[in-house]
Image: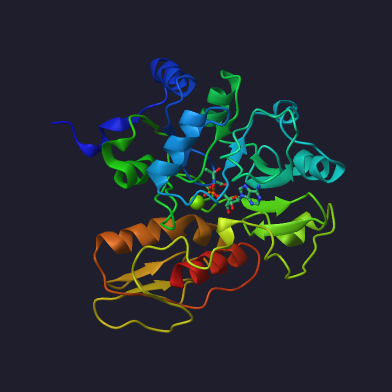
Amino acid sequence: MKNIYSNILSFNKKNLSKTINFLKKGKVVGLPTETVYGLAGNAYSKKAIKKIYSLKKRPKKNPLIVHYLRFQEADKDVILNTNFFKLYKRFCPGPITFVLKKRKKSKIQSSVTAKLNTVAIRFPKHSTTRSILKKINFPLAMPSANLSTGISPVSAKDVSEEFKKNIKIIINGGNSKIGIESTVVSLTGRPKILRPGIIGAEIINKFLKISTSKNISKIRSPGMLKRHYSPGIPILLNQKKAPKNCALITFGGKYKDRVNHFNLSKKSDLKEAASNLYKTFRKIKKQKLKKIYVVKIPNQGPGIPINDRLKRAAH
Ligand code: TXA
Ligand code: MG
């Protein structure tokens, strides 16, 4: 019998054309990106989008991100503005998502945007997914390839364990380098960060003024849901130690290697810590430890999205 990982394919010419044929038929596939792995389908196909929502068990009101090769392709579907180009020039392709006004003539399925008049668009950097985007004439709706509210996958194996035989193709693109989801920035009015990511407000602020007003309740964004990114085990934050049979997630050189201790970055590198976060959650879950205790993580730079995800996972 084939094992559960037999849907993981290496990236070669044959598998590339197989993947493209699947996508053209409105089927969905698992693809690597530099942030996390995604569950990809034709954003113009009703069938594909329906499949994405049902596989993820995702609430219909949570819109999906649409992925393009370049701004020239996105221009058909959304109204690109000056603020967009300021950030596009500096950060794309890369781990940032822009919420923009949808064009009336756009062919994007209304289910992709949860019937909103805006679309979240992204230009992924991973070369595998870019070579697929080069060969198709439609954009890819691609949420993280995990069940709704769970942990985002950072390897092809993670995706396979999440959906088992329910998806037929997962392209292996190695471990996602960044390891947490893209920054989501709304550019329809005053620029606002809807989901923090590795590209932080501090650096975006060098190109345009980010509004820090807390009044974002009107913007629907499941990344803003209180409980999300959850490993399904109780999580306690700002801890110093953990009892027996529990995990302690640590950060920095002062923590020595010990049973059930998981160091996000021994050299206190917050970027490295971000890339290890979901990997560590999955490891702990597999070891069936009862609870997760987490030490205080500095709330600066990549520490901001780390603490955001930890807080939601703990909720
Ligand atoms: O890094 C990423 O962004 C990954 C990779 C696969 O590209 N994708 C990802 O997708 O994280 P997902 O579906 O897990 O998260 C999409 C986020 C959600 O927080 C959603 O609410 C927000 O984008 N979003 C999508 N469309 C939106 C819209 N029109 N307005 C506001 N937020 C939107
Ligand atoms: Mg997600």
Query: Is 90 drawn above or below residue 296 in the view shown?
Result: above
Residue at the image point whose x is 55% and y is 51% from the top: 61
Q: Is residue 269 visible?
A: no
Residue situated in front as seen by the camera: 298 or 220? 220
Extreme residue toward the left, this view: 1
Residue at the image point whose x is 40% and y is 42% from the top: 54
Residue 217 drawn at (x, y percent): 67, 66
Extreme residue toward the right, this view: 82
Residue at the image point whose x is 32% and y is 59% from the top: 283
Is 10 situated left or right of 86 in this image?
left
Is 309 situated left or right of 74 in this image?
left
Query: Is 103 drawn above or below residue 177 in the view shown?
Result: above
Counting labels gives 0
* Rendering quarter of residue 85: top right
Query: Is 75 drawn above or below residue 191 in the view shown?
Result: above
Residue at the image point whose x is 38% and y is 60% from the top: 280
Is 197 situated left or right of 215 in this image?
left
Residue 211 drawn at (x, y percent): 80, 63
Residue 74 drawn at (x, y percent): 71, 31
Residue situated in front as seen by the camera: 275 or 308? 308
* Rendering quarter of residue 79: top right
Query: Is 233 drawn above or below residue 40 in the view shown?
Result: below
Classify the position of the N terminus by image quarter: top left
